[in-house]
Image (cartoon, helix red, strand yellow):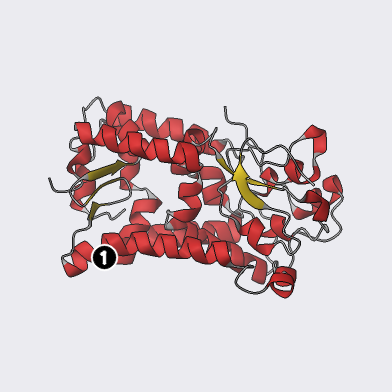
C-alpha cells in the first residue's frame, strides 16, 4: 500500500503533497514574576543560560539532551528523506500517517480524529497506528513528540534563542488553554467541511515538506511561526496555539516518564532553567515545593525536552518516573 493510504478517505489530500510530515494551563510567567514569587535572585532572561553548567560539568553535559533531540529529529527526517531522494523506502508517508518497512503503521491521533469527524472510515491500519502512537506517548510523555520529533521545534527553539540574544521583551502570549479551544475548532471544522481541514495548514507537515521539497507556501508556514515566536509571543506557537501539541498533552497527561527537581536543595536560584524551558510555569512549584508540591513535574504541558537538566550546574533536575516522591 502506498502512503499515506493509511487514512485513505479523509487524508487523501495529504498524499498529493509528499508530506513527510480540562485544560487550564496558565500562561508562562515572566522572569520578573518568577523572581518575585519564588525568591529567585537573578533574572531568568539571562543572556547566556547554561554558562555555569558548562563551567561546572563541561560542554557535553550542558548540551547533551539538546544534541540528542536534534539527532532524533534529524534521524527521523532522514528516514523520510531516503525514499524520495534515494529510492530507499524505509518509511513512507509523513508525520501524520506513515508506514515503516511496509509493516509498521503509525498514525497521528489528531489526524485520525479529523478523519473520524468527517464521518469517513479509515483503514484498520490507521487505528492500529494510532493505538501504537498513543500507547508510546502515554508512557513517554505526550509532548515528548513536540521536543524530540516535531520539526517545528527547531524553528521555535531558534526563535527563542534569537529572542534572548536580541533582548526582545516578554511580548504578549495568548492564554495557554487557547490551544485546546483550537483543537476543538479543528475537529468541528473537519466535521462541517467533510475534510481533514487542519492538514491543509498544519505547520508540522508543511515544515517537513519545505525541508525536503521546498515551496514558498511550505517555507512561509515555517517563517510565520518563527516570526510569531520572535516578535510577538515567546514560545507562542508551541506553548499556546498548536492543536497537535494539545492532542499529545492530553495523551500523555498521566505518562510515566517525567522530569523532577530531585535535588532541589542544591538550587542556587540562578533561574537558567526558567530561561530555557519552553513551558517555564511547569517548573515553579516542583522546584520550590510550594503548596506541598512534590519534586516531579506532573504538568502535562512539560515537553520532557531535558534542557533544564542540561543548563543546571548543580544538577537539580533529572529524568525519573511520576511515582518519585523524595527530594533532597
Number of residue marks: 1
Which residue is drawn at the image coordinates 58% and 41% (left, top)?
A: 301
Q: Is residue 79 left or right of residue 225?
A: left
Residue denoted by label 1: 213
Q: Residues within 10 Å of mark 1 (few under 14, many from 20)?
A: some
x then y, percent, for residue 132: 34, 38
**Above/below status of 239 relative to 190:** below
- Looking at this view, is 3 or 23 the one in front? 3
Which residue is drawn at the image coordinates 47% and 55% (left, top)?
A: 148
| Residue 173 in view here | no
| Quadrant of the rendered image containing residue 274 | bottom right
x then y, percent, for residue 318: 65, 52
- Looking at this view, is 56 or 22 the one in front? 56
Q: Residue furthest top?
A: 119
**Above/below status of 213 relative to 306:** below
- Quadrant containing the N terminus is top left
x then y, percent, for residue 263: 76, 51
Which residue is drawn at the image coordinates 21% and 31% (left, top)?
A: 124
Q: Residue furthest left?
A: 1
| Residue 115 in view here | yes
SS class, disc 1: helix
| Quadrant of the rendered image containing residue 290 | top right
Which residue is drawn at the image coordinates 52% and 50% (left, top)?
A: 237
Amino acid at each position: 500500500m502506498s502512503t499515506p493510504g493509511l487514512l485513505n478517505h479523509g487524508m487523501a489530500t495529504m498524499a498529493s503533497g509528499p508530506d513527510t510530515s480540562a485544560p487550564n494551563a496558565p500562561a508562562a510567567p515572566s522572569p520578573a514574576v518568577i523572581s518575585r514569587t519564588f525568591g529567585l535572585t537573578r533574572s531568568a532572561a539571562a543572556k547566556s543560560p547554561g554558562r555555569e553548567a558548562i563551567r561546572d560539568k563541561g560542554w557535553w553535559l550542558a548540551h547533551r539532551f539538546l544534541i540528542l533531540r536534534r539527532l532524533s529529529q534529524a534521524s527521523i527526517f532522514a528516514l523520510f528523506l531516503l525514499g524520495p531522494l534515494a529510492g530507499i523506502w524505509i518509511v513512507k508517508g509523513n508525520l501524520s500517517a506513515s508506514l515503516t518497512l511496509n509493516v509498521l503503521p503509525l498514525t497521528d491521533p489528531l489526524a485520525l480524529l479529523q478523519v473520524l469527524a468527517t464521518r469517513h472510515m479509515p483503514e484498520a491500519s490507521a487505528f492500529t497506528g494510532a493505538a501504537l502512537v498513543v500507547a508510546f506517548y502515554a508512557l513517554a510523555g505526550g509532548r515528548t513528540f513536540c521536543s524530540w520529533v516535531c520539526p517545528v521545534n527547531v524553528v521555535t527553539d531558534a526563535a527563542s534563542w534569537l529572542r534572548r540574544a536580541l533582548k526582545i521583551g516578554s511580548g504578549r502570549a495568548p492564554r495557554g488553554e487557547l490551544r485546546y479551544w483550537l483543537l476543538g475548532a479543528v475537529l468541528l471544522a473537519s466535521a462541517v467541511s467533510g475534510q481533514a481541514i487542519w492538514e491543509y495548514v498544519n505547520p508540522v507537515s508543511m515544515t517537513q515538506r519545505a525541508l525536503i521539497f521546498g515551496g514558498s507556501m511550505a517555507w512561509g508556514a515555517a517563517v510565520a511561526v518563527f516570526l510569531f515566536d520572535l516578535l510577538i509571543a515567546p514560545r507562542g506557537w508551541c506553548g499556546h496555539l498548536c492543536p497537535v501539541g494539545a492532542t499529545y498533552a492530553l495523551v500523555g497527561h498521566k505518562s510515566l516518564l517525567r522530569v523532577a527537581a530531585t535535588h532541589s536543595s542544591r538550587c542556587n536560584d540562578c533561574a537558567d532553567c526558567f530561561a530555557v524551558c519552553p513551558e517555564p510555569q511547569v517548573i515553579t512549584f516542583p522546584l520550590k515545593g510550594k503548596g506541598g508540591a512534590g519534586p516531579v513535574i506532573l504538568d502535562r504541558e512539560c515537553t520532557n525536552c531535558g534542557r533544564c537538566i542540561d543548563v543546571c550546574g548543580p544538577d537539580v533536575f533529572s529524568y525519573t518516573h511520576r511515582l518519585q516522591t523524595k527530594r533532597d
